[in-house]
Amino acid sequence: MLKTKTPSLKDVAAAAGVSVTTVSRLMNGGLDLPFQTKKRIEDAIRSLNYRPNPHARRLSMGRSDTIGLVVPDIANPFFSTLVAAVEDAADEKRLAVSLHATLNRAGREVEYLQLIERNHVDGLIFVTNHADDGTLAALINRTGKVIIVDEDVPGSNAPKLFCDNDRGGYLAGAHLGSYGHKHVVFIGGDERMISARRRCNGLLRALQETHSDQARVDRYAGEYSVEYGREAALRFLEEKNSATAIFASSDEIAIGVIEVFKARDVSVPRDVSIIGFDDVGPLHLFSPPLTVIRQPVREIGRRSLEMLLETNWQDWKPSASEELMPVDIVVRNSVAPPAK
Amino acid sequence: MLKTKTPSLKDVAAAAGVSVTTVSRLMNGGLDLPFQTKKRIEDAIRSLNYRPNPHARRLSMGRSDTIGLVVPDIANPFFSTLVAAVEDAADEKRLAVSLHATLNRAGREVEYLQLIERNHVDGLIFVTNHADDGTLAALINRTGKVIIVDEDVPGSNAPKLFCDNDRGGYLAGAHLGSYGHKHVVFIGGDERMISARRRCNGLLRALQETHSDQARVDRYAGEYSVEYGREAALRFLEEKNSATAIFASSDEIAIGVIEVFKARDVSVPRDVSIIGFDDVGPLHLFSPPLTVIRQPVREIGRRSLEMLLETNWQDWKPSASEELMPVDIVVRNSVAPPAK
DNA sequence: ATTTCTTTGTAAAGCGCTTTACTAATCCGC
DNA sequence: GCGGATTAGTAAAGCGCTTTACAAAGAAAT
């Protein structure tokens, strides 16, 4: 294969007998040319199979037509569904997506946030799933053009998009309460995390509405992982917790819990009821099918891109702009009246 | 926030009292400078908080330090796990990944393949999951620098990485055979797809080794989707197929099958045995836990990036270079002796 | 003391595009 | 047939970096 250089704008211009400016302007829609000229240029483009060099274009224009997407873990179905939705929406807008996973490694988030600084990307959709010590918030406030999704970075001034965590908790609590559960353990993030705090609040509120001061919720705090789900389930068993139901704050946690309950012959929902959160995996095929609060993950993904694109960053005020996506409950078979 | 322009190499040079060349060469390791000069420059970089503009760098160097990754569907756990592994490996090599989902839409694959042409990306990892009419193969052969993963694009000259499909089929067949199954239906892609062909061959061979000419496999061909799994299960039931076991060629298909079996009160494995393929979802929590051929998805992801990086594209010969990753069987509880 | 290497730099071209500022040609009304 | 507006097009600067080709200064060799 002989090394024919890829054609440049100049080549096209030469072939069409016009200047590069003319070609460039034609291509970018800034010029109405007489039919003849236009056709000559278009023929030249076609016959040379010309495509603009994106790097030159980006350097010249000072933007990249690429958005950054940083998530904790791409393999996690919740995030991968989110990624899929963002990619889909971005593609529609002819934007590329530069994908980065932090895997909760220290410094990763900071590093990826910097991508924006030298306009590697035009904007960033940022999702974290652990508490921040202030570093992240400071960086976000300095760089701008980031949308915070799913979990808050407290102190950051950026448009935010969460699911309606409080309502999620409330729905779970109301459901559990209506079955007669008064004491439930909440397994989720720690109290610094908005998702955990709000879900827990909602849960307790609903329980109290049904059972007033008999209502009680214990909080087990840890990562949103299968591993922590197992750990929490073990703790639940070992401390012979008298709660009759568990509210597992993510699919992953629920999976971990169910795994050990299965191994220890704890029957769900006979011995203990479980209600999950997210509903992205095939939970309906579990035994028993898992009752769950569903997040509209794809909508969250699409909406986050919209927000990134529609906010006018020039004069965006650090307002308390927080958008909440609705959740709902999907009732399956993992909740029953308490045995005890 | 006043509009301080982001610092450029020139600013650094000025601040350090040297030329831009010097700074550039220092940063790219091409120069040993006397300690004093070096320190001056480094101080300047630090105090200006300078970071090179990636677009300028890319334009100048003619490469992007970005690889493209095109998959059929990011939300599908199999692919998302693959994506996660590739991203992880890429990050280690300081490469960005540009992610694209084809969603089996016509023209998408072609379009993304073009990314490589104007060095938008330095290489492409390409995974498709349907048959090609020759267009893709032609394009791939023209552009080069692509690794084909998971499913073949017949006629394409590129390094290829698949799992050991034949052995996967064989393992499934041997397992089923040892339980006394002679007649099984294979649900998977059509005969133009290497994954389907090889798995089916392996399956039949194993069955024949156990039951010689009593062995029989029916092939249901369709997409690797939950939807098709449902469809196939319905067909299975409606035609009262006398097969005693089903080999579902992906997690998705298996999920679809199990869904309808559950709805129709077909008991697994009592009425019919099922064996799946992939094992990326939480199949162990299904009822019953699904026996499955496992693909080393993460390893496939990592390896595909390695292959992209290690092949010397200058003098790569269209050899029959096909690499196979090992699969294994994980026995759970969805296979039992046939009832009939 | 002159030549020859190194060391320590520099100036300037080039990557391929966009865009600003400008000019030449054509058309219109009178 | 002239001034002015419009149309059709150009030249050249600039985006921020890398890299080639070259130079000055000091050290080593003759």
Image (cartoon, coloured by chain):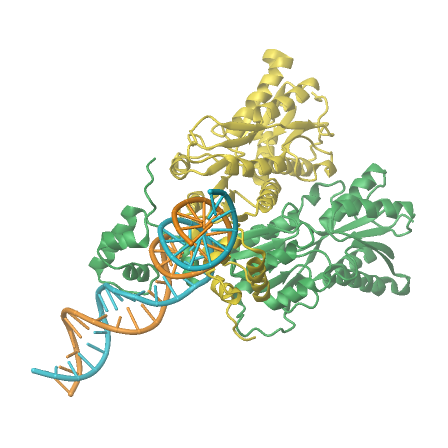
Chain colours: A yellow, B green, C cyan, D orange
**Is A340 in front, or is A250?**
A250
Considering only vertical position in the picture, is B28 above or below A133?
Answer: below
- Residue at 32 percent across and 37 percent down: it is B2
Give the residue furthest to the top.
A212
Residue A31 shows in this picture: no
**Is A277 in front, or is B109?**
B109
Residue B274 shows in this picture: yes
- Which percent across, then down, holds residue A227? 57, 40
**Is B84 in front, or is B28?**
B28
Q: Which quarter of the rendering shows the C terminus of chain A?
A: top right
Task: Tell whether B35 sits left or right of B158.
Answer: left
- Which percent across, then down, holds residue A119? 43, 47
Considering only vertical position in the picture, is A28 above or below C24?
Answer: above
Task: Tell whether A171 sits left or right of A32.
Answer: right
- Residue at 72 percent across and 21 percent down: it is A337
Quarter of the image where one finds residue B170: bottom right
Considering only vertical position in the picture, is A109 above or below B125?
Answer: above
Task: Tell whether D27 sits left or right of A92.
Answer: left
- Which percent across, then down, holds residue A53? 49, 59
Q: How many marks?
A: 0
- Which percent across, then down, holds residue C26? 50, 55
Task: Tell whether B43 sits left or right of A208.
Answer: left
Q: Which quarter of the rendering shows the N terminus of chain A?
A: bottom right
**Is B118 in front, or is B195?**
B118
